[in-house]
Amino acid sequence: MARFRTIAVFVLVSALAGTATAASRSPSPADLIRAAKAARLSDIDFARKSCGDHRTVEQWLKQTTGRSVRSIRWTGGACTIVNKDNPRDAGTKWCARADVTPRAGDIPATVEVFFDRPRHGRPGRAFAFRAVVQTKDGWDTMRETSAFEANWGETHVPGYQPSQNGCR
């Protein structure tokens, strides 16, 4: 009987430890990348929400860069476009990052999607967009997808015409 209790306690403790481990496990870089590509613009950019723009980040990035891009390389991990002094820009440990290399030139732009704390080993809710682009006037950091579109277009797309209201 004592042996049965010992085994039962061991099984219970092991199950609880497994649950705690699964709940606190960080998502893999591949999980973060998949979640970022599938995130809706309306979830990460307030202006896109008011436009009703429900494209995924992957659709939007391909449409924005079109033939002006040489490559888009995704990675997952801690956010890098951060400003620790501003809570809105402090970043998280969970981001997906796209380095977007233009056809003309070799300095990539960077796009990041920020995620809330993971749950059960899966990325949390996508909640923010940040980007850095080299423009004709220097480097520009932005929070809005329309700002990225404009900066990318003006720098890398001949004859680029911005949208009049920031919605596409």
Image: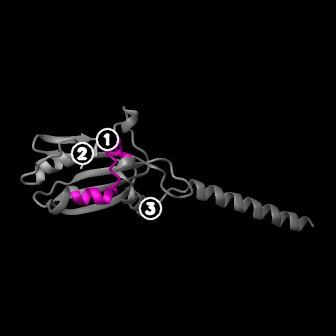
- Sequence-wise first label, 3 or 1: 3
Q: Which residue is mark 3?
A: 31
Determine whether label 1 and label 2 are within 8 Å by CB: yes
- Residue 4 position, x and y percent, is 87, 67
Dot label at residue 146? 2
Q: Is residue 90 left or right of residue 106?
A: right
Asked which secondary structure carries label 1, the reply is helix
The residue singled out by tag 1 in the image is: 47
Q: Is residue 47 above or below residue 60?
A: above
Residue at coordinates 65% horizontally, 58% vertically from top-left?
Answer: 19
Type of the residue with mark 3:
Asp
Q: Is residue 132 above or below residue 62?
A: above
**Residue farthest to the right?**
1
The way the protein has been coloured in the rendering is: one colour
Q: Amino acid at mark 2?
A: Ser
Which residue does the image show at 21% across and 41% down from the upper left? Answer: 165
Q: Nearer the viewer, residue 127 or 60?
A: 60
- Residue that extends furthest to the top in the rendered view of this protein: 85
Amino acid on which disc 1 is placed: Ala
Distance of label 1 from label 2 (alpha carbons): 8 Å
Q: Is residue 25 left or right of residue 86?
A: right
Over which residues does the magenta segment extend?
Answer: 44-63
Residue placed most toward the observer, 88 or 9: 88
Query: In what element is the residue under mark 3?
Result: helix
Give the crowd class for mark 2: few <14, some 14-19, many >=20 residues within 10 Å: many
Magenta includes 75? no
Q: Main secondary structure of the magenta part?
A: helix
